[in-house]
Amino acid sequence: MNKMSRMRNRDTLSAAITAALFAAALAPAGAFAQQAGTTPSPDATTLDSVTVTGYRYAIEKSLQQKRDANAVVEVITAEDVGKFPDKNVADALQRVPGVVITRDGGEGKTVSVRGLAPDLTLTQLNGNYVATSETNNEATRSFNYTLLPSNMLSSAELFKSPEARIDEGGIGGTVILHTRRPLDMEANSGYVTVEGTTSDTSHDIDPQLSALYSWHSKDERFGVLVGVTQQKRTSRTMEASTEDFQWYGNNTDARDANGNVLEQDGIHYWWGRSGFNDQSGRNYSEFFMPTSVNFAVKEEERERKGGQFTFQFKPLDNLTLTANYFRFELEGNYTQNMLKIPEWNLARYNGDGNWAGGRMLDGLTFDPSGSIVTGAQYEKLAGKTYYCSEEQAAAAGLAPGGWGPDDCTIPTPQLTGDYSREKALSQTADLSIDWDISPLWKASFTGGRTWSEGGPSMKFRMAAKPRRQVNGVWQSGNSYSAWDLTGTPSATFSPDLQEQLNVFPGINYPAYINYLNQTYGGSHNRKEEDFVYNVDEKIYSGYFQANFRTERVRGNVGVRVVRTRQFAESSDSVEKFNDYFQDNAAGTPMGCNDPAAAPLIASNTGYVCQSGFVRLPDNLAREKTYALSSMEKTYTDFLPSFNIAWDITDSLVLRGAASKVIARPGYTSIAYPGGLSYVSEEYSNDRRVAGGTDTPGWYGSGSNKNLQPFEATQYDLGLEWYFRPGSVAGVALFRKDISNFTVPVVRDQQMNVGGQSVTVQKYSTQANGQDGVSQGVELYGQYTFDIGLGIQANYTYNDTNLAAVVLDGERIGSSPLVGSAKNQANVTVFYENEKFLARASFNRRGEVVGGLNNGLTQYSEPYDQLDLNAAYNITDALILSASVLNATKSEQRVYLGNDSKARLLSNLYSGRQLYLGMTWKF
């Protein structure tokens, strides 16, 4: 088996002829369908004798394209060359109805439309699929918008209802990004922009530079455009998070905050099936508690580069050839320093001798229901005698079992984190030929190739505890640790911790790696020869689309036929953790001060001293094998679509649409390498002594090659009132009946391992959801005054159901649609005159449904953000601009379950960002 190169390619070649079949009797000569975003516009428009330029021109042009479109479309247009409305394309898209985005480092990363996950939003560049990769090496079908500099675009269209000519894959919607073309611009024109950015969390000032030059011949037959962008940005994200909420009960079923039994699969139970005590003898039971609470600071140094080369040739007035090459690159150095407070100072197992004494727990705090722990305190009490080993406990006449250094020291906060150097590269090359045969006939040819690659070139992790053993005696650098998840999550430690251990609060990873390289030589790559992760798809598609238009009615009808041949292959590991510490003569873990320990450690065969005990070499502690699994399937889909718009009056448009759509499962869902691990009783007992343990038995995760593609039938109905030039009030109703979708699940599952049937605990995989519904209403309006003042506003209500979740033909539960938010609203107020533009944009989205975690659904709390933009025209060619993103300093919070917000999963803040720049146009 060979390791797969993490590069994904997609070659497309399609040809189509779109015909208006409704001729003569239905359509006057020369009348045919007009498609949004295809007609070049001048630099200014004249509406009722008012000359409109800048931002107002952009939004009014977008509104006109929306009105003229056959389908249900939202359009965003750049104010000018290099002046897209927002710094990030995803941020701009979230301002239209029905769009919710995810953020990374404060930047918009992925786009969800009308309650569906980001993987169900198809993104195209100039009508062609564009491949994208993640810097963390995870392949995805969703487009990573942090790759794309927004100033390279002229406009963006979001098709909420499909047309047959548009590639399949956008069940939520299809985003088509348009770049500029030389024959649409003035000869020898372009811009240069220099900008600086900073934030309230990083304080560094990072430079950003972009430039574009366009030329064409005097006869406008031949043109060339070149654009480049280089942007550096330093971000600092602060996050509090939890791990693995487990239920502690005396052989009882888990209950939610309202006292209801949680019957779904995937709930994590403490395997000892008991509660535990604190140092005062109080017993705690029947509650959820995280196994670790973490406080992290993530620093990111990103450099984004973009390049565009476009060539156009127009040999005939009705024939245009366009060739494009695009290159988008994102490099980053990512450093995360984390303080962890795990449950190491708990005596959790009631079969151990140290259980009654409660180790070093001082107490717990709970939510009002008493079923969720929201705080814990650990302390080494002055004057109390603590026992660090089985021998010390036995000498004191205490029962054996569980005794170790966590009974006499506070090993928290553990200082851990990671450092990585990551890169993602996306490239696209395409050629299109557009031939206007006659007013009723058009032909288009498009061919291209898109490819991407990404992943870390280095990923380094380390950890340290604030304690050490000197001459057999444990010394602790901390005597008190506590965490509190109520309000703003916080951690408290003993005052002298900083003095005792000077590496806090962070690690200088580059310096440490340089030290390791100088001391031990450079790092080496180890290739996992048995690692296989491969998806091969061959897609054949064709379509027929008829556009029609009468004096009042226009639209299109068509069908797209798609045949997919899919081969998914991955290697799944089977790893057995048999033992951890070397045993002494009595059969218990051997201490580092045992006379037999020194020869083992000195043998240079892998024995090391850890937590006061002799840890076994890796080859004696565990064994690992691989198994290859694959599946090939072929399926054909017929996708009809119908769009119609009726101009009831000169200002009133009634719009409708119906279609069938599909999307293929994510690459990781069907082929990511899985793994099974077995934890023996011996290994679990050893790890319990050292701090941190897993329940004995089998665990695992893996992809699901039996996943069916997403399928949905969708309907749209809308009414639009264009009551004056540049203004609109509208309402749109939508419904998506989703017969297949995928959801993450975690459950105990019976599996065959080596011919033996075993129960794999907490097996994580993907399953098909069935009979999902996403429906709702969109309200929107736009109004501009002649004095330069304007407002844009929209509101979306999205209702989704609890759909069935099916795994291997068995219904295992129900789940909301991942990515859905019930409420979402946008308001933009702007003022613009010849010299000055000021704009404030407020976005609020409601609670967003996520995947499953420990059997509970993730929910992101409602989030709102205010962005401010201003620009001043020093001259017609020189423009000063400034932006403030997240002026409200909003935070993102995620919790588990819809019964309470006390099970905090994460709380992060990426900062308020500031930009100041200058643009020269020529």
Image: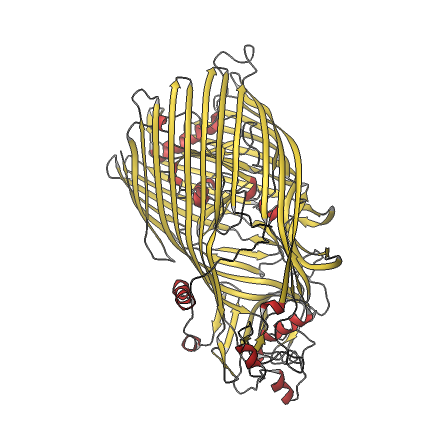
Front one among 143 and 912: 143
Quarter location, residue 661: top right
Residue 7 position in % (x across, y down): 51, 44
Quarter of the picture containing the C terminus is: top left
Q: How is this picture coloured? A: secondary structure
Front one among 551 and 507: 507
Task: Name the outermost residue toward the left.
Answer: 875
Q: Say whether residue 849 is left or right of residue 253.
A: left
The correct choice, above or below, for 215 with respect to 529 in the image is above
Residue 65 position in % (x across, y down): 45, 28
Front one among 395 and 534: 534
Quarter location, residue 345: bottom right
The correct choice, above or below, for 856 with respect to 60 in the image is below
Residue at image position (47%, 29%) is 66
The correct choice, above or below, for 720 with respect to 501 in the image is above
The reply to whether residue 603 is in sight is yes
Residue 496 position in % (x across, y down): 43, 78
Front one among 621 and 314: 621
Q: Say whether residue 207 is left or right of residue 143.
A: left
Task: Name the outermost residue toward the top.
Answer: 24
State how many labels appear: 0
The reply to whether residue 261 is in sight is no
The correct choice, above or below, for 568 with respect to 904 in the image is above
Residue 115 position in % (x across, y down): 57, 42
